[in-house]
Image: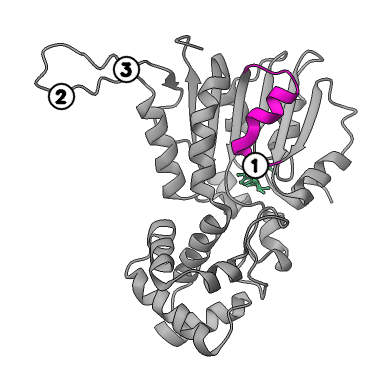
Amino acid sequence: MSNLDYHTPVLLNEVLQFLDVKQGGIYVDCTLGGGGHFWAIASRLSEKGVMVGIDRDLEAVEHNRKRSAAAVKATTIISRGRFSDFDKVLDENGIECVDGFLLDLGVSSHQIDEPQRGFSYMLDSTLDMRMDSTAGITARELLLSSTREELTHILECFGEIRNASRMARALKDWLEHRSLDTSTDIRNCIISEYGPNVKYKVLAKLFQALRIAVNRELEELTMFLHKSLGYLCAGGRLAVISYHSLEDRAVKEFIVANEGKCICPRDLPVCVCDKPSLLKRVSRKAVVPKEEELKSNPRSRSARLRVASRTEQDA
Ligand SMILES: C[S@@+](CC[C@H](N)C(=O)[O-])C[C@H]1O[C@@H](n2cnc3c(N)ncnc32)[C@H](O)[C@@H]1O
């Protein structure tokens, strides 16, 4: 399977431009997927460069390990694991600081299109949704084991679903007499609660909430962001592509919090907070796909790229 059949990389030219790839640099693609970004960056590096790719999904790792690196001069390292543990991979390879991190969050097209992975509400798929199919609980198990209150919290916080308690009640009541093993079961349950004209957006939000909870996506992102500061060389770039507002907000707030803006109360005559400036925004606003990309790859429609560079301070 070619990289493009596996997944079409989103905002590829923009990522290459904003990462400001240096030929002899060290870059880490924390979300390897089909390898679109990984191999494009790797091919721009010289023999002095190092390209590290990480994914928690075995299929993604195997797909990229099978690919011949003959055309690439740089050293390539492909590792299976969670990106919140990227420091272990760098430490094992004696890498102290890097010139760029890339995170292209969410799931790949390959993961969405494989019915047994359970990510799609459009297919009749088993309710798994784990990016790493060998670890943690599935979405089906999550639905069974969580209380109505816990489920309400998941739907409200990760799906931004209004009146989440109604949906949580419907799902838990359904489970008293029937099963929720597949996406079709979920669709039937939601239709029985909201009627046959229920919008696809409702199902999309429910699936998003379950996926984020199953994979602990926001915890992963927060852990990664905090660690990344300690591993970026001065001038190194942090580039994150998000696909929903929860992730994008977390990235934006992290960058703003580390820009060193004074947080003293307004009535203090002088600054006493002495906040260090560790990051500088490279693009003021989030970068979004151009019309042409939206036409050729509709799955890019919600992508937002934010980029910051590490300042000299404490780097
Ligand atoms: C949108 S895809 C990346 C696509 C890739 N940039 C490309 O061009 O093909 C996201 C990938 O990140 C992986 N992923 C998501 N969260 C992860 C995490 N916390 N740790 C490691 N991999 C993760 C998923 O398994 C998936 O393969």
Left or right: 223 in relation to 27: left
Say which of 311 and 226 sits in front: 226
Q: Is mark 1 within 8 Å of ligand 1?
A: yes
Secondary-structure class at tag 3: loop
Say which of 36 and 94 sits in front: 94
How far is disc 3 from disc 1 in space, using C-alphas?
30 Å
Q: Quadrant of residue 135?
A: bottom right
- Sequence-wise, the earlier of marks 3 and 2 is 2
Amino acid bearing label 2:
Pro
Q: Is residue 192 magenta?
A: no
Q: What residue sits right under mark 2 in the picture?
A: 265
Q: Is residue 27 above or below residue 5?
A: above
Left or right: 268 in relation to 107: left
Q: Is residue 145 above or below residue 278?
A: below
Mark drawn on residue 184: none
Q: What residue sits right under mark 1 in the picture?
A: 82
- Sequence-wise, the earlier of marks 3 and 1 is 1
Amino acid bearing label 1:
Arg
Residue 38 in the image: state x and y as whole percent.
72, 34
- Name the residue at 58% across, 79% down: 180
Instruction: State which region is magenta.
Output: 81-97
- Quarter of the rendered structure image containing ligand 1: top right
